[in-house]
Amino acid sequence: MLDGAFRGPVDRAVRPIGALLRRTRITPDQLTLGGLVVAALAALAIGAGMMITGLILVIAAALPDLFDGALAKASGTSSQRGAFFDSTMDRITDALLFGGIAWYLVGQDSPRLSLLPFAVSAVASLISYQRAKAESLGIEAKGGLMERAERIVALCLGLLLEGVGLDGALVVILWVMLALIIITAIQRFVKVWTAAEVSDATQRRIEDRRERRVERRSGRGVGTHERVTVSRRRGGTR
């Protein structure tokens, strides 16, 4: 949702930063790896209960993910390989952060709550898979209430509230995230299912038209052959 609404303005805003980063000769992949390292540190801080430190590190880890695309465009190195690498690192980053939250919740009053961040991570991976699979079929599957940008914002809010002393706020945020991610998964499923049905129907109509054209051509060929044969036979009797 946020990605679709603010992608254009954000891209324009970070474009000058991409040009500045180009002068440092750092590559987009190196920037992405740096964000992954910071995310690992954030996960350790969150697991240790250092929520404000974890919050700062989560924000710091999100910045390379924001700037690597601008750097790739500024340096002319945008590629499918880079997009694949960036997407893979995003999944690893998410796993680290929610793993850190799970570690933190293990030491709380109800260790069973540690399953909650794993549930959030699992369903988040589902919606990422839905988009990847749909795009491999030529169908767009972006959108929804809780995409990755919204998850990072919600996570930061939960860390902030937990860090200032509102015990249990992070758990509440996780439950809300889980509900919204499930809704997003349903939204994407319906969107792709509907689009695929239309695509399949269109493909069937194309195939039917192709078959009818082949049949008509075949019919014309048989008729011509029969007329030539009859003409030859008549000529032979004269």
Image: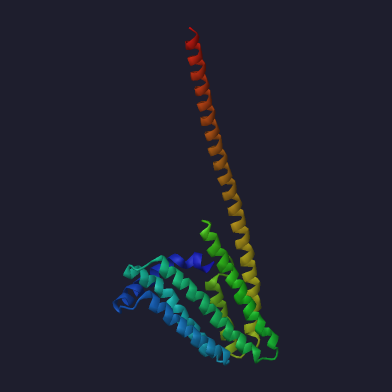
Residue that sits furthest to the top in the current view: 238
The residue sitting at 30% across, 78% down in the picture is 25
- Is 19 on the left-hand or right-hand side of 58? left
Above or below — where is 227 with respect to 171? above
Task: Using the image as rendered, state which of residue 45 and residue 170 is in the foreground.
Answer: 45
Task: Using the image as rendered, state which of residue 220 and residue 153 is in the foreground.
Answer: 220
Residue that sits furthest to the front in the current view: 236
Residue 101, image x, y percentages? 59, 85
The residue sitting at 58% across, 72% down in the picture is 125
Residue 47, image x, y percentages? 57, 89
What colouring style does the render use?
rainbow
Task: Using the image as rendered, state which of residue 8 and residue 218 is in the foreground.
Answer: 218
Can residue 173 be seen by looking at this rendering? no
Q: Dividing the image into 4 quarters, which one contains the N terminus? A: bottom right
The residue sitting at 44% across, 72% down in the picture is 85
Residue 169, image x, y percentages? 64, 84
Q: Quadrant of residue 75?
A: bottom left
Above or below — where is 14 with respect to 106? above
How many numbered dots are placed on residues in this image? Answer: 0
Residue 205, image x, y percentages? 57, 42
Task: Using the image as rendered, state which of residue 51 and residue 118 is in the foreground.
Answer: 118
Can residue 226 be seen by looking at this rendering? yes
